[in-house]
Amino acid sequence: MVDSAQHSGLRLSVCITSRNRAGVIGMTLENILSQCPKDVEVVVVDGASTDNSVEVVSEIASRYPQLRLLAMKENSGLDADYDTAVNAALGKYCWLFSDDDLLAPGAIARVLRACEEDPTVVITDVSVYNGDYTVLEVARQLSAEGQTHFGESETDEFFRECASHLTFIGAVVVLKSFWMTRERSRYYGSEFIHCGVLFQAPIPGTVIVIREPLVQIRHGVATWLRRWFEIWMHKWPSLVWSFDWIDEAKRRAVQEPEPWTNWRRISMARATGRYKWSDFTRFVLPKARRQPWKLTKPLAFVLIPVPVLHQFREVRRYFKAHHPSNARHRDAR
């Protein structure tokens, strides 16, 4: 089959998946489309929304012919919908983007300049704001500045440095023809199909990392917050450790294989209400049946009431701040 992206004349497709996000997607689309030259399109895959998301996107599409909406009759999940968006894209490159974030001024022009070097993948830095973009919480995520190139033999080093950063999907721009050659359905349900596409094997060609915050993340409004334990203690570690061609030390530098055995991680998850008995029975018990001694910490913490653990953490934080060893630092202030 002929790749339509080769003949469309479009350089870039911004690919967005969304479901029941009528309250945020309009702002995102207006922001992106205001930057789009004629050879850039926006593709939105709506995963069978039950709110008025389709109406919101359709109204914007009536004003911007570069916006295409694919309204699904059934919800296939985030990963399958991103795959659908890339399949439908007409651009040579696909920028995988979230439905609730914004682009910094000049972001598309900057990425298009990087694409002139014919890389396989482009990664951008991000900044993090609060939910209504009134407070800048994190100015940048990546270390250093400028632009870095990774060759095929350096994919594992790219993984070590950037994999954690790539848990935010809006940082990824990928050559469509490369995406189409990779295994994808294996990663449906992982929540991170883009990482599966990138790291299932060495990446041919060049990866360019732009160390400029071109994306503005809206913190605290993600739809996955209620599934925090499932994603960050189960799905993400499982995905990272499935890339067995990458050196174990580099995988461990990105993510320990069983974070639910780490008392600091599990206690924080419990104290913030992100670790419940249902998480213990669904995700921890099956993993520890053959190694029951690993249940000690996750079982102990799930039995502690959240208010008690939260109060304990506050007391511990107070005494740590007022420990005599910190007196010199307090006096210095």
Image (cartoon, rainbow, N blue to C red):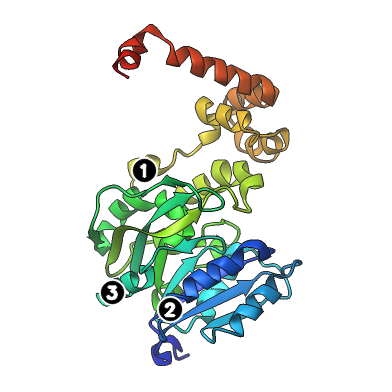
Disc with the residue nearer the chain's start (2 vs 1): 2
Q: Nearer the viewer, residue 172 or 126?
A: 126
Q: Identify whether 290 is placed above or below 51.
A: above
Identify which amino acid the numbered label 1 is placed on. Glu
Disc 3 target residue = 113
Q: CA distance from mark 2 to mark 1?
A: 42 Å
Disc 2 target residue = 36
Residue visible at 31% across and 58% down in the picture: 212
Disc with the residue nearer the chain's start (3 vs 1): 3
Disc 1 target residue = 248
Q: Nearer the viewer, residue 232 or 225?
A: 225
Q: Nearer the viewer, residue 63 or 211?
A: 63
Identify which amino acid the numbered label 3 is placed on. Arg
Residue visible at 51% across and 62% down in the picture: 193
Visible residue check, residue 186: yes
Tag 3 and tag 1, C-beta contact below 8 Å: no
Q: Identify whether 319 is placed above or below 253.
A: above
Q: CA distance from mark 2 to mark 3?
A: 14 Å
Residue visible at 56% across and 29% down in the picture: 268
Identify which amino acid the numbered label 2 is placed on. Cys
Secondary structure type for disc 3:
helix
